[in-house]
Amino acid sequence: MAKKNEKINWEYAPAPESTGHINLKEQYNLFIDGKWVKPNSGKYFDSINPANKEKLASVAHANEKDVDKAVKAARKAYDTVWSKMAPSERAKYIYRIARLMQERAREFAVIESLDAGKVIRESRDVDVPLACNHFFYYAGWADKLEYAFPNRKVSSLGVAGQIIPWNFPLLMAAWKIAPALATGNTVVLKPAETTSLTALKLAEIIEESGLPAGVVNIVTGFGDTGAAIVNHNDVDKIAFTGSTAVGKIIQKAIAGTHKKATLELGGKSANIILDDAPLDQAVEGIVNGIFFNQGHVCCAGSRLFVQESVADQVIEKLKHRMNSLIVGDPMDKNTDVGAINSKEQLDVINSYLKIGQAEGATMYQADCSLPKSGYYCRPTLFTDVAQSSRIVQEEIFGPVLTIQTFRTVDEVIQKANNTPYGLAAGVWTDKGSRIFNLTTKLRAGVVWANTYNKFDPTSPFGGYKESGFGREGGLHGLEAYVKLN
Ligand code: NAP
Ligand code: MG
């Protein structure tokens, strides 16, 4: 066992994933009505690799006219083909998309890591398999909707406008598209501007699957492209995942319209270690909860609460573990923490590191070297924080953990719930009764016990308070795309 906080020099030989098998075009157009069309404005923007700032491809910037074309295509496909098709036939297409994605899993994983900066181990073992599983899972529901909603008449909504963020680009696309198709809706989807490439690869698979033209349309662009979808009169439902700030703009924009909405927004989730928890496992779970995907996880366990009697021990173990994390090339299979998604996000994280120090908190960073080029941040923890500190209250969306201590369970419930958000929480204890007590009192959409960041297509996901409303995943995820009579 290494001594307290001693740097561990694990020597791993480089193990980079190869990129020889991927097929990326230099330029991507919009996928509308089953065809690849040039953007009305003629404008394209660059998608870069945040690990080295190199350009990967240029991507079309869709404006209102392009969005209008996409919505018209989706409406026509809804009216003439998709809403009329037997549900069992719809299911076959969704299964086909799942299988094609599975066949090309390696290509998807590599492109996701290149474009988003996330480590290849995660895109390979988490993002892509889960995205496939969402299509498989919802394909299964397509012809069983009357069993999902017994004694109700189930009908589709029409055209779904879907807007997704950059932290799980392919997975978020799957979360949105699969249940929409299974319930008989057609789709216009906009990926985030920094991570469009896997959604465009998904469009290629959709084309290959023979899905009727216009059922899924992918329009790339910036916030203005998203706003054009939100404000289009002929969209029946908005499914948005992203920041609370943009969620509020969307909610205002659709107030008083016929549009149904689900908003999956930000988070500031609490991870709670009680004194009887298996501490080594808990520390591993905390590390996974905040440093997984560079902390670019809406439900990241970014606030750690430790019971006072074990706090010193936990903090020491945590620092020790942080020092063994490998931060660097996302394409290397040994890397634990990859690149921050964009310069803008790195600037946000760095500004919070300054805010934390200015607020009087004590900052500790993993003692590791960072690659020379690209956007990286050392795993960071803050102690000596107050409940009112901005770094405790505001979402940082990076590998930054705050630590607070508590004496009683009631105190930690009160502190954990004292935030505008309510997306997720984690509880670490040996005792079942303590788990039941905490999980029923924590105001969070998901509460994990003795684990963290576990996802499954059968399980609903969504928030309380400013983390949004509506549920995605599982049977609940179907409800967001149907009318029930
Ligand atoms: P964001 O800035 O809100 O962007 C999300 C999406 O909305 C992007 O595609 C963005 O386009 C688009 N957009 C921006 N302005 C818009 C507008 N006025 N109208 C319509 N669309 C607009 O969020 P982000 O920075 O990409 O993602 C990080 C946030 O997502 C975090 O707060 C995180 O917690 C949250 N998130 C939540 C969940 C969940 O399930 N609750 C899951 C993942 C992430 P551009 O990218 O081109 O700006
Ligand atoms: Mg990129």
Image (cartoon, grey):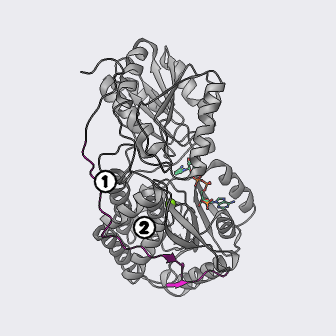
Q: Which mark is residue 278?
A: none
Q: How many marks?
A: 2
Callout 1: SS: helix
Q: Is residue 200 visible?
A: yes
- Taking 253 as reference, is 43 left or right? left
Q: Quadrant of ligand 1?
A: bottom right
* Residue pictured at 41% horizontal, 37% vertical: 369
Q: Which mark is residue 146?
A: 2
In the image, the segment drawn in magenta is 12-40
Q: Is residue 388 visible?
A: no
If the image is split into quadrants, where does the C terminus sit? bottom right
The residue tagged 1 is 125
Where residue 91 appears, as percent x and y from the top left, is: 37, 74
Residue 25 is covered by the magenta coloring: yes
Q: Residues within 10 Å of mark 2 (few under 14, many from 20)?
A: few
Where residue 425 appears, as percent x and y from the top left, is: 47, 35
